[in-house]
Image: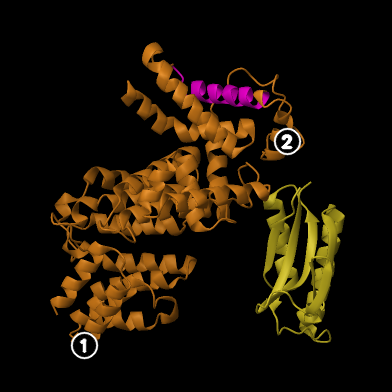
Amino acid sequence: MPQYLISVWHDDTFEVDLSSPDAQLRVAQVDAFNSELQQAGAWVFAAGLHPASSATVVRSSGGEVSMTDGPYAETKEQMGGFWVIEAADLDAALEWAGRAAAACDGPVEVRPAQG
Amino acid sequence: MTDGLDEVFRREAGRCTATVIRVLGDIDLAEDAVAEAFAIAAEQWPKTGIPPNPGGWITTTARNRAIDRLRRESTRSDRHLAAHRLHTDTMGPARNPDLDRLDDFVEVVADDQLRLMFLCAHPSLAADAQVALVLRLVAGLETSEIARAFVVAEPTMAQRIVRAKRKLHDNHASYRIPRLGELPDRLHTVLAAIYLIYTEGHTATSGQSLTRSDLSTEAIRLGRTLVELMPDEPEAVGLLALMLLTESRRPARSSTDGTVVRLADQDRSRWDQALIAQGHQLVRACLRRNRPGPFQIQAAIAAVHADAPSAKTTDWSQIIALYDQLYALRPHAVIALNRSVAVAELHGPDEGLAALARIDIATLDNYQPYHAARADLLARAGRRDEALAAYDRAIELTANAVERDFLMLQRAAL
């Protein structure tokens, strides 16, 4: 079955205060959504990520490996978390994505995995 | 004979492609196969005559040619089909066609055209890609024709179409008609794509001439097809009515020297009464269903205009009421703009300008019709300096040569 990446994007400066009622509500919503995915057999993997400032960029060139402070993309919007799901087709994936967007209260991007 | 073939091609290309896509499960394969079948027809039919069921003939021949080709490419065929197969609701993803057990004769299935429309106007595609795919696959236009119609280079249009097809393919888009729950949104996207083709033909956004009637004709043809396929969808009927009623004014929209004639100044005896009658009948038919939607309301507005022997005698209060209904469904600034123009007709330019002032300007600042309408109202209200500035802004935003000439004339008359 096709797999899709559903990624969550927000402003780089976005900081989650987990003690706030808003954040608590979002956590509960995402948990409920994850359970739905699992019950439907659509779940492959999911994770929320630490802020983009925690990222390290690693490059390999001619056998040399070098590291720099991340994130890689110097854009205002950064990925804050993601799901990998299995869905029968694009429409099914987009339907899950709609629920993902509602659960985390922000825009998500859907991309098909190769293969 | 070639005339006959052209006619069959125009009528059958989209229908055949739609069915062959389902049979083969692959857009590119189907396009090539249908083109090959038409080439064979062009060679054979002058000798044998057009077969009684030309669509079935083309579809069957296309299917057979594609299978021959896949077989020639030997063991790749199954893998090829498996890798490319679009899912349909009749054939699940697991089932690949057994090449030897397909029916001998492929019937053209009307539902396939609907599947194709919903696929081409998939909401995951940008509007310009939806429009290009609908014209290429459903309407059967050549890429070069579509490129000319939208005044872009042919390689640009070709790339737009290739990218859109690849996106649908990579994303495992299904070849199916949306379920009832998804239908209103998905249908609206299809209708919006067809209307975009119509409006591009009606007021070309760029180029030398005001209209590209071939695009309008194509959009109306698509609208008729959709109504045939979904006769119970009042919004599809509403879209067709809107296009026909707008089209009825085409003969009066530009003067002999090619300049724009505004609705108020048009010679209404030149309006196409046959189109108006068809449009009216459709408006009545869909309003009876009592499931109003944006296209039906816009069609009703066009019908009120069509009823009036002159701009002065137009039932403007009815038009304002319809714009209020439309705004309740679609609270867009452009609708508020059109409503303000109607208010000016009923209550004078000052009231119209007051209504304009209540619109959130941010969304309209780069919208040429806003500045053109405002300039006209300011001029009528005797506020010359402000009108000049508004005309300047409108002219700056106009890419269509004919419209620009019109605005410059208006400005010069101040």
Query: Residue A32's x, y, as percent?
Result: 83, 66
Looking at the image, which residue sits at the far front?
A: A62
Q: Which residues are magenta?
A: B52-71
Q: Secondary structure at mark 2?
A: helix
Establish if B27 lies above or below B205: above
Disc 1, disc 2: CB below 8 Å?
A: no
Query: Residue B238's x, y, as percent?
Result: 41, 51
Q: Quadrant of the C terminus of chain B?
A: bottom left
| Chain with orange colouring | B
Q: Secondary structure at mark 1?
A: helix
- Taking the image as shown, residue B369 lies to the left or right of residue B263, namely right
Most foreground residue, A67 or B347: A67
| Chain with yellow colouring | A
Distance of label 1 from label 2 (alpha carbons): 68 Å
**Label 1, on which residue?**
B385
**Label 2, on which residue?**
B82
Q: Is residue B3 magenta?
A: no
Query: Residue A46's x, y, as percent?
Result: 83, 65
Q: Quadrant of residue B27?
A: top right
Closer to the eye: label 1 or 2: 2
Q: Mainly helix, strand or loop, the magenta region?
A: helix
Asked if residue B15 can be seen in this view, the reply is: yes
